[in-house]
Image (cartoon, rainbow, N blue to C red):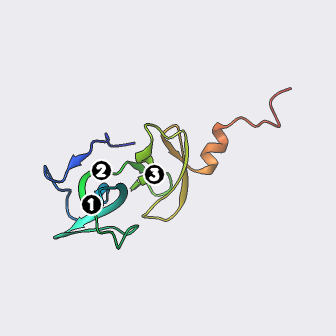
Amino acid sequence: MTAELRWVPVSERMPADDQRVGLKMLEHGGQTFYTMGWYTGDRWVLPENPHSEGEAVAWVALPTFTCPHCGKQTEHPQALAFDKLMMSRASCRHCGKEFLIVDDVPMTPAEYQKRSPDPENDGN
């Protein structure tokens, strides 16, 4: 992953306009929930929770990986929940292709197969 995960209070600093970030939200009833969104102009855009009445209290830059297909940086919001990704799938938001992340290393399925031993041909 390319970024150290550090939650930034919105009272301290806002993210750059249109930067996709992980958000810690506080609902009016006092419940906390987490989602993904971006700040644009004067409001938060929350595609996964468009009708939320909550207030953003902190944000964190989303973990990014280099797509093994197109070479561009792409976010992987689910990586926020883990210190290290042992095995995950991600889709590049630039080229749309899916790739694997194994031990925090992005790779194509073909690259993964080259690295994995073939259980049917173990040399015995």
Residue type for callout 3: Gln
Task: Give the alpha-carbon distance from disc 2 to disc 1, as whole Å.
Answer: 8 Å
Q: Is residue 109 left or right of residue 66?
A: right
User: Residue drawn 26% across and 52% down?
Assistant: 59
Label 2 element class: strand
User: Residue drawn 52% across and 37% down?
Assistant: 103
Label 3 crowd (10 A; few <14 / some 14-19 / many >=20): some
Give the residue pinned by disc 3. 78
Q: Of tags 3 and 1, which is closer to the observer?
A: 3
Give the residue pinned by disc 2. 61
Tell me if residue 112 can be seen.
yes
Q: Is residue 115 left or right of residue 38?
A: right
Give the residue pinned by disc 1. 19
- Residue lying furthest left: 12
User: Residue drawn 31% across and 60% down?
Assistant: 20
Task: Give the alpha-carbon distance from disc 3 to disc 2, as whole Å.
Answer: 12 Å
Of the image marks 3 and 2, the number of the one nearer the N terminus: 2
Callouts 2 and 1 close, C-beta under 8 Å? yes
- Residue lying furthest right: 124
Of the image marks 3 and 1, the number of the one nearer the N terminus: 1
Residue type for callout 1: Gln
Q: Is residue 35 left or right of residue 18?
A: right
